[in-house]
Amino acid sequence: MQCHRPAYPGCQARPSPHTLYGMELTITLRQPHRRVELFGPEDRHLRQIRAALGVTIQTRSTTVRILGDPPSVARAATVLERLQEMLDQRDDLDQHAVGVALAETEERERDGEAGAITVFARNALITPKTDGQRHYVEAMLEHDLVLCLGPAGTGKTYLAVAVAVHLLKRGSAKRIVLVRPAVEAGEKLGYLPGDLQQKVNPYLRPLFDAMHDMMTFDQLKRFMVNDVVEVIPLAYMRGRTLNSAFIILDEAQNTTPSQMLMFLTRLGHHSKMIVTGDDSQVDLEPNQPSGLIDAVDRLHGCRGVDVIRLSKSDIVRHRLVQQIVARYANADARDGRELPGPEKHGARTASRSAHDAPAKPDLKISADSDEP
């Protein structure tokens, strides 16, 4: 995944399900003392943006609040950021400059391909680097339940979070729920101090890391306070029904079959559920079957469910990670402990042939990090 240019840092965004607007975005001005030049005489520039994009714009001393449908709000924010960049290079702006900013935004969207996926943090483009990652993104957009298996570094969690944030921004999901089992990786850490959030935070840290690439710290904090983004341990999922949500279960290889059944049955109306894990790194007690492997065996071929397996060729971390995974796999194979493969659990590899699926254009994801 590759990251390119920034667009509107310092913004605060949230869906507005209880208003006439689909999305609300608050942008902090870089140079509040130059707001008159930015807004134009009698807010002429803002009126031009309103008329072109059909959004509502409200101003304060240091912020601009944009309301409307999510795509239009994102365009208006990009135009305002472009105008602020122009203002850094000149003394004043005119209506022609606003027209140029609007045209550049429209051209950038055309160049970014139809179906480009954006997140809140920046209007940069992150492109899945491999065919496997691209098929994984396609599966998440097309199916309500996707189980993704693959080694470390293939972007399983990062891409799932990116698609979740994209759907939240577009208004297709009302909330994001990130779930992880609290299982240690071969070490017993004992009792952890603090309240519930402090106890589970070490287990949920990878999910927080991905979210921080998609939005600012203050924005994530605001989403969590409003329950738009929820990060919880698997043990607290029982009894819940999640409607209009994008739900991600990470490290699912460390669930038991009964836990997996409990989690999968939380799926509500208008929701999507993504289950990710590396079935070569199971940290359960010996002889305890993995809920992820069990679910793949049971659900493979079920209508509405897609099972994707990423391989070591999809690893996009440091170049050494791919070699490390290959060396460990070869050593295990020599010792008679062959790592699980796609055929064993009924999963199809994401790198399908041309006969398996029609060719589709590359999907691009907007974020501000190139590290999965």
Image (cartoon, rainbow, N blue to C red):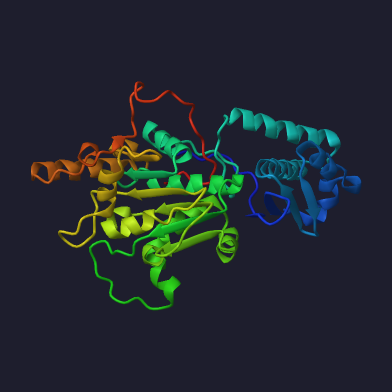
Asked whether the viewer can see residue 158, the reply is yes
Residue lying at 60% horizontally and 44% vertically, measured from the top left: 170
Q: Is residue 120 left or right of residue 201?
A: right
Toward the top, the furthest residue is 355
Residue lying at 28% horizontally and 41% vertically, measured from the top left: 322
Note whether 130 is above or below 122 in the view shown.
above
Residue 292: x %, y % from top left:
29, 51
Residue 99: x %, y % from top left:
79, 33
Residue 70: x %, y % from top left:
66, 45
Asked whether the viewer can see residue 150, the reply is no
Note whether 56 is above or below 98 in the view shown.
below
Note whether 333 is above or below 229 in the view shown.
above
Q: Is residue 343 left or right of residue 228?
A: left
Q: How many tags in the picture?
A: 0
| Residue 60 found in image quarter | bottom right
Residue 283: x %, y % from top left:
24, 59
Q: Is residue 267 left or right of residue 341?
A: right
Q: Nearer the viewer, residue 23 or 243?
A: 243
Q: Nearer the viewer, residue 13 or 371?
A: 13
Residue lying at 73% horizontally and 51% vertically, measured from the top left: 20
